[in-house]
Image: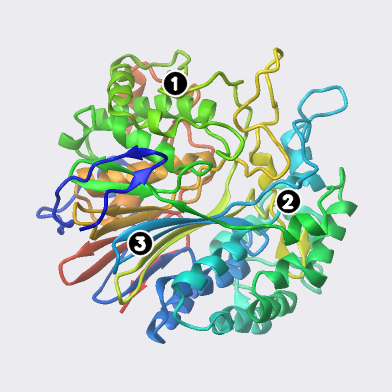
Amino acid sequence: MLRTLVSAGLALSLIAAPALAAPAQPAASPSAVGTGAAGKSAFARHAMVAAASPMAVEAGLRVLRAGGSAVDAAVAVQAVLGLVEPESSGVGGGAFMTYYDSRTRRLSVYDGREVAPKAAGPDWFLKPDGQPMSFIDAILSGRSTGVPGAIAMLELAHREHGARPWRSLFGDAERLADQGFVIGDKLGRAIASGFPQAHTPDANAYFTKPDGTRYKAGDRLRNPAYAATLRLIAAKGSAGLLRGKIADDILAKLRAANLGSPMTREDLADYRPLKREALCAPHGPYRVCAPPPPAGGIGVLETLGLLAETDIATRNAADPQAWVEFARASRLMYADRDWFVGDPAFVSVPTPGLLDPAYLKARAALIPGVGAAPVTHGDPPGGAARAPDRTPEPGGTSSFVIVDPHGDVVSMTTTVESLFGSGRMVDGFFLNNQLTDFSFSPANPDGTPAANAPAGGKRPRSSMAPTIVVDREGRFVAASGSPGGNSIIAYVAKSLVALLDWKMTPAAAVALPNVVARGGIVSVEKGASPEMISALRAAGLNVAPDQGEASGLHAIVKRPGGYEGGADPRRDGVAKGF
């Protein structure tokens, strides 16, 4: 018998359920609710990879065909993504992985979130006059970069669940870096964008051809420096990145930047990834599991818990009222999340209280009255006084899902934070600007600290929420994840409502329009149906066009005889298997 998982001290019971079956009737098509685009779909009998680049997917499948595990494939996928999608993730960033072990039917979380240098303090992003600096100035400063954690996290997960030698997992990425790869549409748009990180001296040097013109989609780009970095990581593991020459290069780059970082060799060498227990909660006949704080899983689970008190499961994606309920519940969740969530090693996060059934029921009772007026945080058991949060939290992120032939599953979200991170390159890769995920205003005038205030050795709050769903017996049902800054929580929650409540296919679920209700604005994706927008406005919500990063959802569900996957049509990704 699979033991009941205890999440953050809260025992959450398991509920009996069969695995997801294919929809008996065709699910509402994406065009019926307004996106006008269909997700990319695949079916496979034995194993599957869904990721943001076809090249990364092929690298992962090659590892699986050679007898590799889901974690082995994740290493290969990340290595390729860091090359072909550097605006989103890489060895200079961080990640969260939710892992399902089919043999034990247990779920674990591997935390590779970046950490602040020990010298960081509450005034990290304050100007001499005590006011917060501008977000762009912060990104471009040396202080924006945290100690990278993605590679160390993958190394830990591989040590526990790898089947192939570590050094054998980087071949595809090394070859593509040495020989060159064809720039995809998404990277091409990022290179041509007006974001300042795309036009730093390092970015200009990398993305400018010998004839002085800028690389674009369809061009072939080589990165031999990245190949050399991967060879060092393949030989030495995370020590090849966090110690020695590359570590010294990172420090030199950060010190030379405007408002140089006091990061030290010890900060890099002392980095440790964390293995955490997955945060799980029931949703109808399923159990949904995601990373606990400082990650965004708590937001996904609270959203689902609030929606369980509504009739959204009896509706469908073509019903505008379903999106009204989703937006209202999202506003309540974000108000809680922004107030209470930070690094649990530094602040007390009321995780059990936010998922307490009585609290969710009382909070959900507010849903019918949520309009454009400000929404305040609730008072969950264990909550404490906090200062308002001031975290911009944009997104330069990627997410992927893998199921191996043994049935083990990885859902991983990985990031350098903003587009091309800080815009600074070292040895072929971009450095993250992850520390700008801290609240720029660390405290109230009375000194009450923000939960997500900067501090030395602290992990900044994250929205990343790679999610895995199981049934009562602990059998794998579905997995999902997305990039998108603070919108990640809404994107993932949307996909889970579509998959679990509305019984949509993965491709249809990920392609649904995005509705993000954080703060006073309900951001609705361009192309959403007029009926949806009218219903949201009639409900008194302040609707605005979507201005955030587009989702990049990937999802896989267990079907009789195999797996069905879907990739977000908004990006270059695919789902593929064998």
Query: Which quarter of the figure has residue 83?
Result: bottom right
Residue 387's spot in the image, x, y percent? 61, 20
Badge 3 density bin: few <14, some 14–19, many ≥20, Cα 10 Å = many
Residue 480's spot in the image, x, y percent? 37, 54
Q: Nearer the viewer, residue 438 or 487?
A: 438
Residue 108's spot in the image, x, y percent? 41, 57
Going from the N terminus, do you reach mark 2 or mark 3 first? Answer: 3
Residue position marked by numbered label 3 in the rendering: 100
Residue position marked by numbered label 1 in the rendering: 542
Query: Amino acid type of disc 2?
Result: Ser
Residue plotted at (52% across, 74% down): 76
Q: Quadrant of the N terminus?
A: bottom left
Q: Residue furthest bottom?
A: 66
Task: Name the disc covering residue 422, or none.
Answer: 2
Q: Nearer the viewer, residue 508 or 66?
A: 66
Query: Amino acid type of disc 1?
Result: Asn
